[in-house]
Image (cartoon, grey):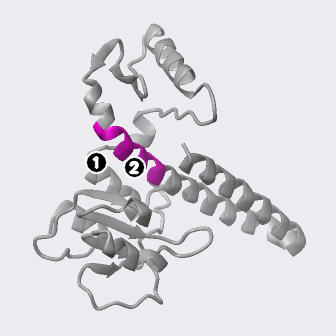
């Protein structure tokens, strides 16, 4: 059993190739693992057949009602249950291991810039400010890829930026859902007793904010 199998607590089909990871069926390519997770409007299991058609080598899901006898479609019950100490779930740990990024939340800061105009200028200016202030910084964007003041082969960014951005989008989704679920538990404990109308109003506002945040992030 390899490290990825241990994280999920399952055995992969024999001779399986994993070339990438995504939770968006439209981004599936040959050899990708598709994580079918519960979304805002529908469960990802609805798109499993689409992911398989696009070449997904394996699908991991947590939809109890989705039944399949295919060995490459695997149900993991506790896939999205967060550990109270690490605040990470199995999907998060899988991403860390697959991309060989250890403790990426606490050891590094990530800045992403979205919007219509000024993204490139703002991102690169921020990079320069960090370097001038004595921090180590990596810039990845339309101007290429830089580590501090050193230019990294521009072909790297053209080949990997989209893959890396897809990873970040997936990661942000997981992080946001973590905070969302934590907030729900907190609100349930502290406000439910004060009246269901107040609780439902707060939940609705939180849900709308989360949906807008994810929408903005995914459009980056």
Quarter of the image with the C terminus is top right
Name the foreground residue: 72 vs 205. Answer: 72
Residue at (82, 70) in percent of width and height = 200
Quarter of the image with the N terminus is bottom left
- Image quarter of residue 42: bottom right
- Image quarter of residue 25: bottom left
Name the foreground residue: 93 vs 46. Answer: 46
- Where residue 24 sits: x, y (%)? 44, 62
Q: Which residue is mark 2?
A: 167
Q: Which residue is mark 1?
A: 99
Residue at (73, 67) in percent of width and height = 189
Tell whether 153 sits left or right of 163. Answer: left
Q: Which residues are magenta?
A: 159-171
Tell whether 45 sits left or right of 214. Answer: left
Q: Earlier in the sequence, mark 1 or mark 2?
A: 1
Dot 2, crowdedness within 10 Å: few (<14), some or many (≥20)?
some
Residue 158 is at least partly visible in this image: yes
């Amino acid at each position: 059993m390899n490290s990825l199998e241990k994280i999920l607590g399952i055995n992969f089909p024999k001779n399986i190739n994993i070339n990438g990871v995504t939770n968006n069926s439209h981004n599936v390519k040959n050899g990708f693992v598709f994580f079918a997770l519960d979304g805002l409007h529908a469960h990802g299991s609805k798109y499993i057949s689409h992911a398989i058609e696009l070449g997904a080598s394996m699908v991991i899901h947590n939809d109890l009602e989705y039944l399949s006898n295919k060995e490459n479609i695997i149900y993991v019950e506790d896939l999205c249950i967060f550990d109270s100490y690490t605040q990470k779930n199995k999907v998060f740990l899988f991403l860390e291991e697959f991309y060989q990024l250890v403790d990426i939340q606490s050891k590094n800061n990530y800045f992403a810039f979205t919007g219509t105009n000024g993204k490139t200028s703002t991102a690169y200016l921020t990079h320069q400010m960090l370097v001038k202030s004595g921090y180590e910084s990596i810039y990845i964007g339309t101007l290429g890829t830089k580590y501090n003041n050193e230019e990294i082969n521009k072909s790297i960014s053209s080949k990997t930026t989209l893959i890396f951005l897809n990873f970040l989008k997936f990661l942000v989704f997981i992080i946001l859902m973590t905070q969302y679920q934590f907030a729900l538990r907190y609100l349930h404990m502290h406000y439910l007793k004060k009246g269901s109308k107040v609780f439902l109003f707060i939940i609705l506002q939180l849900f709308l904010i989360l949906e807008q945040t994810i929408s903005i992030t995914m459009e980056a």
